[in-house]
Image (cartoon, rainbow, N blue to C red):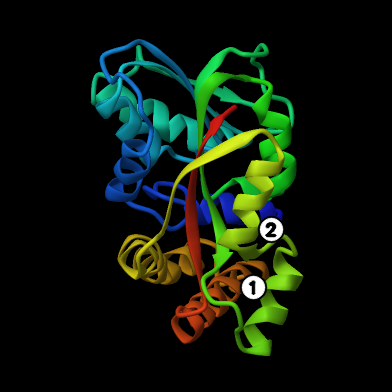
């Protein structure tokens, strides 16, 4: 298996592939002034196995198109949505977030939790905007500095991993400069990181290594994730995911 295939396998059969929670999705949704009885057209971009997709489908009406590059995650979402009787409300498409299959001014809501970094925050909000109706909403969570200064070690780490990491004020300026009016922002709690993401991740490391015969590539995958967890526990007061909610002007 390639390292990418190992990474996909590591996250198979998990509710989330990044920090977040049911309550985070609901809080972001509540910033949007929408009629929840109206039939809406929604895209969940980089949906993974769709924990937040299910939450959206359970709380607003309409059709959700869930898009991800990896079919294994979408198959998990298809199974979950069928079990919950939501299969007619959630349509999955294997597609890059750079090639969205929507017309201009088609969508009421574009949603993306912990995934916009794959294209870059600025590129994402620019490229996706044309698909939103005027007055439509964007809801994205994005890695964000939550202090104006931070230790050099963690700053160097994140600048190497994702150079677009920035403060919320600068992210909001990007939204305003690209035709959006911000309507809400909040920081994901440590519970969303630890209890919902990292603790379950740590628990599956041993089984993952055993499944892959403790191979060098499998050990590298596990060690990379353990380093990420150590960094978060040590520097959690300096960064988190910020959830940004904005309306297309």
Q: Residue at x 69, y 39 (%)?
A: 124
Is residue 64 among the parts visible in the rendering?
Answer: yes
Callout 2 crowding tier (Cα within 10 Å): few <14, some 14–19, many ≥20 = few
Please report contact status of discs 2 and 1: CB closer than 8 Å, yes or no: yes
Locate the C terminus and report the quarter of the image it occupies. top right
Q: Which mark is residue 3?
A: 2
Q: Report the front residue among 99 and 111.
A: 111
Callout 1 crowding tier (Cα within 10 Å): few <14, some 14–19, many ≥20 = few
Q: Report the front residue among 166 and 154.
A: 166
* Distance from the alpha carbon under mark 2 to that under mark 1: 9 Å
Q: Which mark is residue 194?
A: none
Q: Report the front residue among 107 and 5.
A: 107
The answer to which quarter of the image holds residue 105 is top right
Q: First in sequence: mark 2 or mark 1?
A: 2
Residue topped by disc 1:
220
Q: Residue at x 67, y 52 (%)?
A: 4
Is residue 4 positioned above or below 53 on the image? below
User: Which percent across, then down, holds residue 51?
Assistant: 37, 41
Question: In the rendered view, does 186 fall on the left or right side of 68?
Answer: left
The answer to which quarter of the image holds residue 131 is top right
Question: In the rendered view, does 75 fall on the left or right side of 167?
Answer: left
Question: In the rendered view, does 38 fall on the left or right side of 120?
Answer: left
Question: In the rendered view, does 76 fall on the left or right side of 127?
Answer: left
């Amino acid at each position: 298996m390639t390292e990418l295939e190992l990474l996909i396998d590591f996250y198979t059969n998990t509710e989330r592939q990044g920090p977040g929670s049911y309550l985070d999705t609901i809080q972001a949704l509540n910033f949007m002034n929408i009629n929840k009885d109206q039939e809406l057209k929604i895209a969940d971009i980089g949906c993974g196995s769709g924990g937040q997709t299910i939450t959206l489908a359970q709380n607003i009406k309409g059709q959700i198109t869930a898009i991800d590059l990896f079919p294994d995650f979408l198959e998990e979402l298809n199974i979950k949505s069928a079990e919950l009787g939501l299969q007619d409300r959630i349509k999955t498409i294997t597609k890059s977030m750079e090639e969205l299959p929507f017309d201009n001014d088609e969508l009421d809501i574009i949603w993306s939790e912990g995934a916009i970094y794959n294209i870059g925050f600025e590129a994402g909000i620019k490229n996706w905007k044309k698909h939103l109706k005027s007055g439509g909403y964007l809801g994205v969570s994005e890695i964000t500095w939550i202090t104006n200064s931070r230790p050099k070690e963690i700053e160097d780490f994140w600048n190497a991993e994702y150079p677009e990491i920035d403060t919320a004020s600068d992210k909001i300026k990007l939204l305003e400069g690209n035709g959006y009016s911000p309507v809400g922002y909040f920081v994901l709690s440590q519970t969303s990181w630890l209890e919902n993401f990292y603790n379950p991740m740590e628990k599956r490391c041993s089984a993952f290594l055993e499944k892959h015969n403790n191979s060098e590539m499998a050990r590298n995958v596990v060690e990379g994730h353990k380093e990420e967890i150590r960094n978060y526990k040590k520097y959690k007061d300096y960064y988190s995911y910020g959830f940004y909610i904005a309306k297309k002007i």
